[in-house]
Amino acid sequence: MSEREIIIPPSMQPIVERAGYAPAVRIDKTIYCAGQVGRTAALEVIAEPEAQFVACWENLREVLAAAGCTFEDVVEMTTYHVAMSQHMAVFREVKNRLFPRGLCAWTSIGVSELAHPGLLVEIKCIAVQPS
């Protein structure tokens, strides 16, 4: 039977305590990352869309790093978008700048809202830790 390891970057301990979830869970070499959003370390939503998207990717990068992974290890990604048609061009530009293109399966889903007012995107993914 595989062991479950909870991955919590130190800077995310406050969100774990407040929301009661694990930023990621490792089973063998597979890392299941919970959805990450564009917020500050003080858990404040970033209002400006491009800055929010950058922070979202950086929060995801931090979770993956705590699990010994990078963006290159992501094999599947789902993004959830509020007002997708309004913000997708900027989101794609930020994604293409920060995340390697064409290395994972990606599904984008439009949603009416996320966990907190003002959030525009949430990114969740699965990564496989390198040998």
Image (cartoon, rainbow, N blue to C red):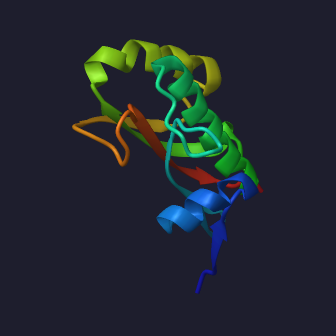
| x and y, in percent, of residue 49 in the image | 46, 20
Quadrant housing the C terminus: bottom right
The foreground one among 126 and 55 is: 55
Task: Give the side of residue 48 with respect to residue 109, left or right.
Answer: right
Residue 91, placed above or below residue 125 = above
The foreground one among 46 and 29 is: 46
Query: Residue at coordinates 57% horizontally, 63% vertically from top-left?
Result: 16
Residue 78, placed above or below residue 89 = below
State the residue lying farthest toward the left. 112
| x and y, in percent, of residue 112 in the image | 22, 37
| x and y, in percent, of residue 92 in the image | 46, 18
Question: Is there any visible trace of residue 23 in the rendered image?
Answer: no
Question: Is there any visible trace of residue 94 in the rendered image?
Answer: yes
Task: Give the side of residue 68 with respect to residue 105, left or right.
Answer: right
The foreground one among 91 and 12 is: 12
| x and y, in percent, of residue 107 in the image | 36, 37
Quadrant housing the N terminus: bottom right
The foreground one among 69 and 51 is: 51
State the residue lying farthest toward the bottom. 1
Query: Residue at coordinates 69% horizontally, 55% vertically from top-left?
Result: 129
> Residue 103's quadrant in the figure?
top right
